Amino acid sequence: MTRADSISYLEPTQEAGRRFVQRNLAGPVVMLNLLRFRGVADYSGHPELAPARPISGAEAFNLYVEHTLPFLRETGGDLLFLGHGGPFLIGPADEYWDLAMMIRQASAASFLSFASHKGYLAGLGHRTAAVMDSRLLPLSEMALPAGGARS
C-alpha cells in the first residue's frame, strides 16, 4: 500500500471505544495524539464553523484547541504538551506527523465525560476540518523500575 492509498484515521471506531473502556484504566490517563493536517481546512461537513476566508488545517486545529481547552479543564483534563512534529528518528522514513499533543485526563471516566460534552462537541468540526490523519494512544502511568526513581 502506497502513502496515497493509505487509510486515514480520524475518529475511534465503536470497537476501539469498547476496548478502551474494557481496559479499566485506573488513575490518570494521558492521550498521545499524532496529527497530520490538511493543506486547506475542509469545512464542508461543518459550514456553520467555517471562517470567512479559507484557512490551513493547522489554523483550523488552533481554533479547535482554543474551543476545546475550557471543556477539557472543566472535565478534569489539561493540555500537557503541544509540539511540532516531523519525520521519525526511528520509524518509517516516509511517515511524518505535523503535531504531537499530550492531553492528561484525571481518569478514563473523565475522558469519556469530556468526549461526550455538548459544548465540546459543538466545536469538534474544527478538528474534522483540520485533520487529514491522526493517531490517538491512551497511556496509563506505570511505576519506574527500582533503579529509576525520580529525584
Image: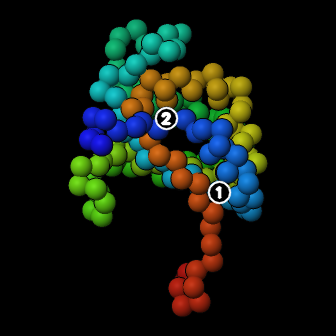
> Marks 1 and 2, how far apart in space?
20 Å
Query: In the visual, does 11 lie left or right of 58?
Result: right
| Circle 2 residues within 10 Å: few <14, some 14–19, many ≥20 | some
Q: Nearer the viewer, residue 88 or 119?
A: 88
* Residue 47 position (above or below residue 58): above
- Disc number at residue 146? none
* Residue 48 position (above or below residue 137): above
Q: Quarter of the image holding residue 26?
A: bottom right
Q: Quadrant of the C terminus?
A: bottom right
| Circle 1 residues within 10 Å: few <14, some 14–19, many ≥20 | many
Q: Nearer the viewer, residue 146 or 25?
A: 25
The residue pinned by badge 1 equals 29
Outermost residue toward the left in this view: 93
Query: In the visual, does 59 lie left or right of 65?
Result: left
The residue pinned by badge 2 equals 10
Q: Nearer the viewer, residue 113 or 16?
A: 16
Residue 70, visible in the rendered structure: yes
* Residue 110 placement (x, y as % from top left): 74, 46
Q: Which residue: 23% across, 55% down?
A: 93
* Residue 24 placement (x, y as % from top left): 75, 58
Q: Amino acid at mark 2?
A: Leu
Q: Quadrant of the N terminus?
A: top left
Q: Which residue: 70% across, 58% down?
A: 23
